[in-house]
Amino acid sequence: MTVAVGIDVAKDIHWIEVKVAETGTVLTSHAVENTPAAIAGMIDEVHAAETVHGPARVGIDLLGGIAGLLEAMLIEAGLTVVHVPGLAVNRARRGTVGGEHKSDPKDARVIADQVRMRDDLRQVTAMREDDVELRLLVGRRSEIVADQTRRAARLRDLLVSINPGLERIVDVTTKTGLWLLTRYAAPGELRTAGRARVLAHLRKLDHVKAASITALADAALAAAHAQTISVPGEAVAADLVRDLAREMLTARDQLHHIDRRIEGTLDRHPDAALIRSLPGMGATLTAEFLAITGGIARYPDGDHLAAAAGLAPVLK
């Protein structure tokens, strides 16, 4: 005989259901706090069931994140852990009485039944440290890029409301353009400062061509002289533009730092060289691929990888 265990993962409280695989008899079903002590007690329960009914397979519906501690402790305890995807849980739940109504005990029961009935569930193994690092770094990089896109859109919207001419000439995706906006945003500010002060501010940047600085300063001043009227709310909008420009410059530095860490991790990763040899696979895309897959060693062959990516024309 064997034991089937289903765990519905949550942030604070997991729910576990333990069944005898052959008969479906429920041995226990209860909540488990997401703490080391509570999870250790749950593992002892599973081991106790194993001594009576045989080896256990433990199904979980999430990997990493809020399931990180649970996943690590289950694997460390020597239990066989399999992944029951959330989509499979949702579909299976709909076949139960009141299936549209989700609850933690019901999902734990469904997961345990999936473990009982299916032998094609992928076994979960401990991820390499490099894979975990890439997943964390790529996740943080994606957040910063999304925030940068939002800030850039807001900055352009504010700038065009007070100084359309300057908005047309300043590229807010460049360090030089953002540096200009940390000091000068409104037309009156540029006219008051004059060419010498604007150039002096731009020259504080390192590794920027003098010709580029001069061209930007002259274009900004030309736009400022072309608009002599002040619009309502100009001073506040200019302050907000400056704040956003500083935030974007800080985020650029953060991205540069993360990219360097990603490069260092890829240098150590055993799969990175092979993946980067493919056309179009730079450091960022390689890191994202490895972060999502958790390393190509987790897939026996290309067909399994295609199935996981949803490219294989089969239901699973």
Image (cartoon, rainbow, N blue to C red):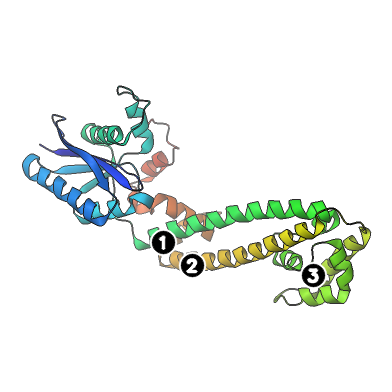
Q: Amino acid at mark 3?
A: Ser
Residue drawn at the location 76% of the way across and 67% of the way down: 180
Amino acid carrying mark 1 in the image: Glu
Residue 39 location in percent, x, y?
A: 23, 51
Left or right placement of residue 105 versus residue 268 in this view: left
Residue 64 visible in image: no
Query: In the image, 37: left or right of 232?
Result: left
* Residue closer to the observer: 212 or 148: 148
User: Closer to the camera, 287 or 80?
Assistant: 80
Question: Which one is earlier in the sequence, the residue at label 2 or at label 3?
Answer: 3
Q: Which quadrant would the C terminus be assigned to in this image?
A: top left
Give residue 54's position: percent from left, percent from top.
Answer: 10, 41
Residue at the spot 75% in from the left edge and 53% down from the top edge: 158
Residue at mark 3: 212
The residue singled out by tag 2 in the image is 261
Label 3 CA crowd tier, 10 Å (few <14, some 14–19, many 20+): few
